[in-house]
Amino acid sequence: MTAVDDHPAHEVGQARPRREDQHLITGHSTFVDNMQLAGMLHLAFVRSSMAHAKITNIDVSEAQGRPGVHAVYTGKDFAEVQGNLPCAWPVTPDMVNPGYPSLAIDQVNHVGEAVAVIAARTKAAAEDAAEAVLVDYEPLPVILDMEEALAEGAPLVHANTTSNKSYTWAFDSGQAGSGGNVDDAFSGAEVKIKRRFIQQRLIPSFMEPRSYVVQPEGEGLTLWSATQIPHILRIMLSLTLGLPEHKVRVIAPDVGGGFGGKITVTPEEVITALVARKLGKPCKFTESRSESLVSAHHGRDQIQDITMSATKDGTITGLDVELTANMGAYLSLVGPGVPVLGAFMFPAIYKIPAYRFTCHGVFTTTTKTDAYRGAGRPEATYAIERIMDEMAAELGVDPLELRRKNWIKHEEFPYTTVAGLTYDSGNYEAATDKALELMGWDALKADRDKRRADKSTKQLGLGISTFTEMCGLAPSRVLGSLDYGAGGWETSSVRMLPTGKVEVVTGISPHGQGHETSFAQIVSDQLGVPYDDIEIIHGDTASAPRGLDTYGSRSLTVGGIAVVKAVDKVVAKARKIAAHLLEASEDDLDFAGGKFGVKGTDKGLMIQEIAFAAFMAHDLPEGMEPSLDSEATFDPENFSFPHGTHLAAVEIDTDTGQVELLKYCCVDDIGNQINPLLVQGQVHGGLAQGIAQALFEEAVYDADGNLTTGTFVDYTLPSSADLPSFITGSTYTPATSNPLGVKGVGEAGTIASTPAIINAVVDALRQYGVNDIHMPATPERVWRAIHSGFGDTQPAAEQTTAHTEGTSNSDRSGS
């Protein structure tokens, strides 16, 4: 039993190393692919080599005869039982969903789509047999370009639809009553500019590939999955396969990263379950890295046409966003809602009086898209922060001063934006001032100007991104208003054991963020129990039966607060027992450091002593149950809104086009911080991911619909050698929407860094007549842009030409 005088130190705010690291970084973790069950079979999938084709025949005879092969199945074998994969976000009542079979039956709609599955004694035997399956295809037109897909008379991706448009979702502040009419704002505008920005397609590239093990058990099954959403997955499997929900158990053991890429229900999960049940044997599937790149869902892939108006003095008066979003070949779990989620963040931190947003979801013969780190918010932040720089250039003012003129001032919070969100707190001035100081901004500007005057071949560019995001995806009533197919609450239970130890069960399911550490720190302070005496239980629907899992930086702001609420209930019950045992009134008790003390006396009891008394149940208040357990569910009234200022300095070699990130500084305001070390880790990882979009990563298809970036040789992930040491800082404006004052940090670095980098690149290139660069800003693209600006006879890169046309089309009606 814990010594009753073992008072814990103050935990919240301490930079504790992660307790998870003891096993995560020493090779003692249990990932799904480490699992071995008696008699287990291994699966391999046959995947389409065609982007769009009818399946005329599948010959599995040779594969069935291979050594070790137990069974070979095609889509037709499961046609009656597989059902369609779920889409939980029908964003409009008329959204077209053509259906998404786990195994293609008559037609394939993207390269990499599964058409058959092999079950064999070993993984090698299954993969060998997969190569022996012969599939005959009748090619159909390949449809890769979103605008061509929407054109009149375009070939259809799905024969059971009348167009390639899935939906159109729109918001108009004039109609909603949250702001003015955009057409009126534009008609009276002194300055109006229009730009087209491209969000290239990205691939989540999680460290641990997707992996599943299914053990069939009577009417149900147990699934071990490398997933972010074990609870949602259990519900969806139950509905998709027609299994009793209480007979389905999902376990997410150690999960090696997700970034949104493990937030969906995959075809491979469903088929692994079907094969295991059909054969009555446990089955495992672990994808190869190449399979992951071609068939796991992708992210981003949007065309952003954005128009902004302003007065001559730089006051923004209107914003119109026309968004075209690539759904890929199918609608996945929350894919349609990702661009819609971004709709609320285009106005960002600015006081924009009139706003209109229109989004078209489009089918193409490419891999499906869905949530990818930030999910809609990085895309919106990129567009607004890019066009703020373009407007500053149009007006001939400093980009930072234009932002200062238009952002919401510290004293104006809470502030309801033109998109209808109410920001509870923030201080953009403080974060920006601190970032400028840490960065050494004035000295960098002097260096930049000198290099320009000297016509150096090493030009310096400086970029700014001032951002906010909405974290803690939860308020269920808000999600309901957006037709999201679930609530956003989170639950937790706390069990005080007789020995004074504590078990905390959470519906949050981490995949590397450090929840076991930060949640234990919170409970230690709230309950007055030593940090090491607290165990966090998660990721198994048997031991943690209720929850809505991890995504959208909701773990702490929703799941962490559910823990606090459960602890509050434990303390309240313990207070009654303490009062009874101390023969005092509850009102006469103080609770601090885990001890109930009678005011004005030295009498008191530690909460561990009360837990033991509850267990013994010899002397409890009349009618009280003998335990100190509790459960709580938290559904916040509002999102939280972290913000920050990110600054980048890049050096561009004008002879080669090479971009080098010289210096990066960010100051993030995420409210109160539970563990600054975890915050640093989240920020660093997010920065690497956002910078990678700006400079390195892009999923590219050739004209036949083949993914030409299907390996890590072609799909360029940055290494630590590609990035500088980051300068990071914090300001603290607590959230008012939760009792801890926390806001969320998981996606901040990714959201803010991409526009900061591209703004820096364009800042260096603008002197050459370049006003945009297609991401990633590769040396070739930068070199071509420079030489096109000089009037070089070489044609400019297509993307740069398109963007430059945006400048030439800018509409000045008064300046």
Image (spheres, rainbow, N blue to C red):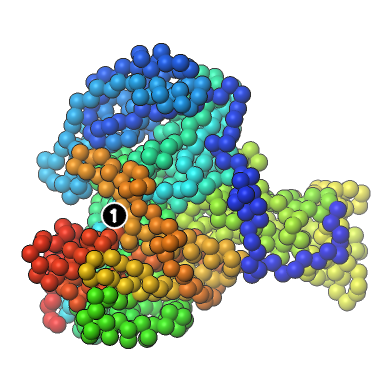
Near-viewer residue (669 or 627): 669
Q: Residue at x 27, y 60 (%)?
A: 778
Quadrant in the picture for residue 518: bottom right
Q: Secondary structure at mark 1?
A: strand
Q: Residue at x 83, y 64 (%)?
A: 6
Mark 1 lies on residue: 200
Please, is residue 411 above or below residue 612 in the view? below
Near-viewer residue (626 or 360): 360
Please, is residue 699 above or below residue 292 in the view? below
Residue 803 visible here: no
Residue 791 location (% of width, % of height): 9, 70
Looking at the rendered structure, the number of numbered marks drawn on it comes to 1
Q: Residue at x 22, y 85 (%)?
A: 453
Near-viewer residue (68 or 210): 68
Quadrant in the picture for residue 587: bottom right
Please, is residue 227 above or below residue 653 in the view? above
In the rendered structure, the answer to whether residue 198 lies left or right of residue 351 reads left
